[in-house]
Amino acid sequence: MKIRINEHFGDIKESYLFSDIAKRVNAYSEANPGKKIIRLGIGDVTLPLTPAVIAAMHRAVDEMASADTFRGYAPEYGYDFLREAIADYYARLGVNLRAGEIFVSDGAKSDIGNFVDILGNNDILIPDPVYPVYVDSNLMSGRRITYLEANAGNGFLPMPDGLPEKPYVIYLCSPNNPTGAVYSAAQLGEWVAFALQTGSLILFDSAYESYISGDYPHSVYAVEGARSCVVEFCSLSKTAGFTGTRCGWTVLPEELEAGGVKLGRLWARRQATKFNGVPYVVQRAAEAAVSAQGHAEAMEHVRYYMENARILADFLREKGIWFTGGENSPYLWLRCPGKMGSWEFFDYLLQNVQIVGTPGEGFGKCGEGYFRLTAFGRREATEEAVARLRNLL
Ligand code: MLT
């Protein structure tokens, strides 16, 4: 063919991080069919949907079976019942949002990846290490990225001090994937002040907010001024076990505007053109998940995963392996023992004890020498992993 392709795909790695890991694990598994692999790599949940969610889905399925209650195309930005239920959820967190400021979607990953569509050619600020979608989606669109170094010295929470005073699009994730670090209200306040001062936009990923147990903001809108400079992305994947069910949302407060144009209007226009909405059955499931009852049930699962995190953390302490996370986050971020490189440690664990984790380097240059373990496994698998690691490390 003689067409031109998007040459910026040449700027990203050959495979997406988690596809790359899956390929390596599948190859190992084919070559070693008798070995039982324990997967603590990708942050995929293992507990089923909760009773309130399942009941809501069953009811919605029955509605789809009758001509009187059947639903076709959903409203592009989500049914009002769900937008209102999400606004209620925020109200319970002490944050007031209008239902119309909430745009329902099939998850935070797609929304964060798609958001570049409505932005021009800005300077992009992204912490390193970081969830790879922020970087890849910007590189694919040919954007310039400045990396903000996150390291043990700054508690993996880079701050704006010393940055040139100019407008950026800034990506923040708290609790952080992969490091598990959490910004305090005061730290987020500094980021918001920087954004307001420089005319920057913050894209805030709060997908792990329900893992917070300490005194940290669950939503960036708890911070004064955030409504004028922050878009928040959230998801039910990790909160309510929706990794396969798919539902999340993006919040664009009315105050967000650039050059006299409301960002909410642009996002609505983008979604109306390129997105067909979330299935009715899933939106009813999501409504149940964010209800008081559904959320209480989901929190039992969160506590289960956080007990796994405690088991992993105790083991790392016992071995004197430096780590962070695992307290307000389902991820533990550890320094590879014996000065091993991230991929070296990945291979070492896979070959010797058949445990899959995520090499820190996959999250950026500053992740080299680190390794991420997830607490999303089943209890038996987590305990078995610790037993195997105890013999190896
Ligand atoms: C992860 O393991 O980092 C996440 O599961 C990826 C995702 O949420 O897309």
Image: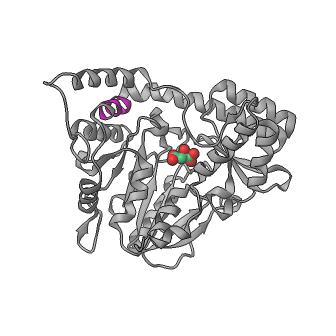
Dividing the picture into quadrants, the one containing residue 341 is bottom right
Apparent side of residue 34 relative to residue 256 in the rendered image (left or right): right
Dividing the picture into quadrants, the one containing residue 62 is top left
Residue at point 63% right, 36% down? 375
Residue at point 35% right, 68% down? 119
Q: Is residue 157 above or below residue 67?
A: below
Q: Is residue 182 visible?
A: yes
Where residue 92 appears, x then y in whole percent? 36, 37
Where residue 389 appears, x then y in whole percent? 80, 36
View extreme (left): residue: 68
Where residue 370 appears, x then y in whole percent? 72, 54
The reply to whether the magenta stretch includes residue 28 is no
Where residue 337 appears, x then y in whole percent? 82, 49
Q: Is residue 111 above or below residue 202?
A: above
Q: Is residue 378 above or below residue 143?
A: above
Residue at point 24% right, 54% down? 272
Apparent side of residue 12 relative to residue 382 in the rendered image (left or right): left
Report the quarter where the C terminus lies. Answer: top right
Apparent side of residue 221 relative to residue 303 in the rendered image (left or right): left
Q: Main secondary structure of the magenta part?
A: helix
Residue at point 62% right, 51% down? 20
Q: Which residues are magenta?
A: 283-291
